[in-house]
Image (spheres, coloured by chain):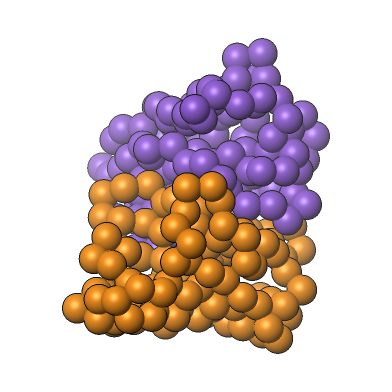
Amino acid sequence: QVQLVESGGGVVQPGRSLRLSCVGSGFNFKNHGMHWIRQVPGKGLDWVAMISYDGGEKLFADSVRGRFTISRDNSKNTQFLQMNNLTPEDTAIYYCAKDNYYDSSGGHMDYWGQGVLVTVSS
Amino acid sequence: SFALTQPPSVSVSPAQTATISCSGENLANKYVAWYQQKPGRSPVLVMYQGSKRPSGISERFSGARFGDKATLTISGTEAPDEADYYCHVWDRKIVFFGGGTRLTVL
């Protein structure tokens, strides 16, 4: 069965950096686009970024563009979210999600990880 | 700019039909997906391409798109259907989620 497992969350001071990882299993990782979506507890879903199957296409929400980068290592079935210059507004649960397509062709997120909490606080 | 609008809450009695709406420009021509999220859990896909159900999702769930609106309908609503529901589309290389609708089964 499809599994997505995030790691790398924690407490970090404003202005610092953090890198999240997401390992996928149970599907052909290299054939699918991957997303990061975040959610402040008690609030709605907020899309962060997406990377195409081969890493050739990378898309970001306006709120994180220029501070966050997304990458993937298909040999390790893993995607990453590098978060720089973090602010308290970045505090949220970060979910990794699999796209049913290989790029931004208008697919949907058919599987989600369990999420990892990032807290930005001094 | 593009946005998706959902009612914050919908209430329904058990065994009745619940309809959750999602409004946005030209949704009839976009691939609309719906996610169910229960407290403390990750979202689960319950509808995609407007009206297609993933395997394992009850036939009580159905979806439609027309004009600037999409709907998720749950027939014969049961207590376990109580959750937050989010619509989702792509628009110009950006992913949009609706603000979410809390479905309460009274």
The residue at 42%/51% (across/down) is B43
| A15 or B74: nearer the viewer | B74
Residue B73 x/y as whole percent? 47, 75
**Figure quadrant of residue A53:** top right
What chain is the orange one? Answer: B
Residue B49 x/y as whole percent? 67, 62
Left or right, residue B86 beside residue B104: right
In the picture shown, does residue B10 fall above or below A95? below
**Figure quadrant of residue A80:** top right
The residue at 63%/52% (across/down) is A108
Left or right, residue A62 beside residue B18: right
Q: Is residue B6 visible?
A: no
Colour in which the image shows chain A: purple
Residue B81 x/y as whole percent? 32, 64
| B81 or B75: nearer the viewer | B75
| B83 or A118: nearer the viewer | B83
Residue A33 x/y as whole percent? 68, 38
Left or right, residue B67 beside residue B42: right
The residue at 52%/41% (across/down) is A111
